[in-house]
Image (spheres, grey):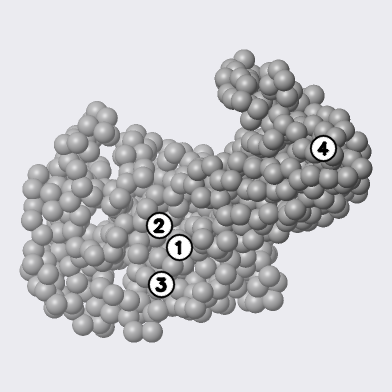
Amino acid sequence: MNAPVVAAAPDRPDPTPAGALFTVVDFDRLPQAVAEFLAAPAHTPVPVACAERPDLAHAVELASRLYAGIALPEPLDVGILLGAEDLPDGLPALARPLARTWVTEHELCGTAEAFRRRHPGTLLLVGCYDRLNLDPIRGLLLTTYRGREPGLTLLSGRDAASVAWNVAKQYTSTPAAGVDAIGLFTDTDRPPHPSGVRVFDDRDFERVDIQAEILGTRWHRVAFQGHGKDDSVNLGEFTICGLNAAVPPRAGLLGPRCAYGLPCYKPEDKLVPLNRVEAAEVVLSACNSGPLADLALYDPRYQLLLNALDGPARTIVSAVSVHDSDRPENVAWMRAALAGADSVDTLNAGLAGSHPYPAFMRFGLPRTPRDMPAPTPSEHRPDPLVLTAGRRLTTLLTSELLPHNHALRPRLVKLARKVDLWLARPTHLADQSPEEIRSSLTADLQSLDHVITEQVVANPENEIMSYPAHFGDRSSLDPQVREVTCHCGRPAQEFTRRGLLPHVSDTICAVCMRCGDVTFRVPEAPSLLAYAADEVAQGGELEVRAVLTAARPGPVRLGLFVPTYLREDTTVVPATVRIRAVDDRPQDVAFRVRFAAETAPQAYYFTVFAVQDLAVSTARRHFGVVPRRT
């Protein structure tokens, strides 16, 4: 049979009252039963052609308790019957109201992009599972990557009876009264427990009868996350099982252990048959939980997706391949489930920043309210300050710049662990908002910057101040050289030494032929210049004007020190200064260096340093002490 090219959806009458949602019929009576239903959907049960499938008849009984009534769903834009000639009479007519426009399967010839240009909008594919092959499904699925609307929906099953059952389920209305449980069972995460969601993780699998929890609850939406294959999802010692014992095996196809008379690799009294789970929506958040037909590992008799489609769930969400779903997706899915948002759109948006393909497919019409905004595709791009802090912590802790017993190490290690968690996708943005992460990080950085400043003032020979030589010895010269002006007013060259290993930081140095190496800093650290008179008298006071240009707005701490042989004869006021940098505008910071009357006349230098976000920048200025005039 060929699908009609265009068909309009009929008006949507009020839902049929619960109690007579479905009627089981033989295939030869399906066309007449469908015609009767579509003529009066508000008062007629949906026909289900499953008289020869007792497992589907049982699913019909379960579904009759799950849904409140019958209502024509919101149609999708474009529909296609796959293998229409193999579908029973009456099924195309039952599917017709589910899409506004129907086109033939021949339209899929050519590229998926060309098809989508000809037929934009939401797309519904209806057909047996053996028609869901790499070509054309992969191309169509890829066109939905980072999309902002439900781009691809499938209605399928292991045979014509299963397809007819899944089409029939789309006419159910809202879940029945009391069917409001939302559940997440995860063996790979320990997510938060938001109000309204029943969360079970590996700790619960040790003390709770998970089989009874799953099979003894009528779920609005339930998700299973764990390792497995296309036949199972592992939940500790419990297993979500894809075996449908009512379906005969196919000769010559690979099966799991039980297909060869061997016991299951998990306790058989802890198996959870997926087609017996009473849920309006089932999410199979495991890799390859719903492979395409020509990519499947096992005989269809054992496949999770097909067993779920045989069950009462109106919507099945499965993974077509591998994916990195973890804490962010779990948290996002729970929020979406509570808000009534679409699971596939939510999960694929969350994973859009991790792999370049949609991992999850939707079996069942989307039910998202029209006014609900589409989820924004994620970008795994942590705050640049987190990245900067992470790089600096790596250089400080792994470059051997700081000895193993350095006083800073314990606090740096503690912060490095926190930064690693903030950077890792399984935790990034899942438990803390970007604002909370930045607030926590800046508090830690300010505290450490204070400690570094105080340590340098107390001992300017602190190992952290040796970074220019330590990193420079493990670097090569970048050929790009910039002409700058030294704070003495003469020309200088600024250049970069590039670290040769990942834990060796780049260093930026400015050299003046008169003053020598006058400034040092690392990338994205404050830049400094230091201005002062060339001479000061014994017993006098040298006024120093440090000019700081910060890499980012925020607190910066500054200090000044002189060489060891001058310290007993000098007093620096103030010892340290804390300023708040604004944008990238230069800011003046004043110091005064007071000299004892007995200070030996000769040439000296002082060093101004600035600390921000674990980076130390320095500027050195030469001057002379001259005899006091009498």
Q: Which amino acid type is shown beneath numbered disc 2?
A: Thr
Q: Which amino acid type is shown beneath numbered disc 3?
A: Leu
Front-lying residue, 416 or 272: 416
Residue 346, quarter of the rendered image: bottom left
Viewport quadrant of the C terminus: top right
**Mark pair 1, 3: CA separation:** 9 Å
**Mark pair 3, 4: CA separation:** 83 Å
Q: Which amino acid type is shown beneath numbered disc 4?
A: Arg
The mark found on residue 629 in the picture is: 4
Q: Is the residue under label 2 in contact with that under label 1 (CB below 8 Å)?
A: yes
**Mark pair 1, 2: CA separation:** 6 Å
Q: Residues within 10 Å of mark 2 (few under 14, many from 20)?
A: many
Left or right, residue 153 beside residue 103: right
Q: What's the residue at 44%, 49% (across, down)?
A: 378
Left or right, residue 63 beside residue 527: left
Left or right, residue 354 beside residue 99: right
**Which label's residue is closer to the chain start, 1 or 2?**
1
Q: Which residue is mark 2?
A: 346
Q: Secondary structure at mark 3?
A: helix
Q: Which residue is mark 1?
A: 333
**Which label's residue is closer to the chain start, 1 or 4?**
1
Q: Which residue is mark 3?
A: 338
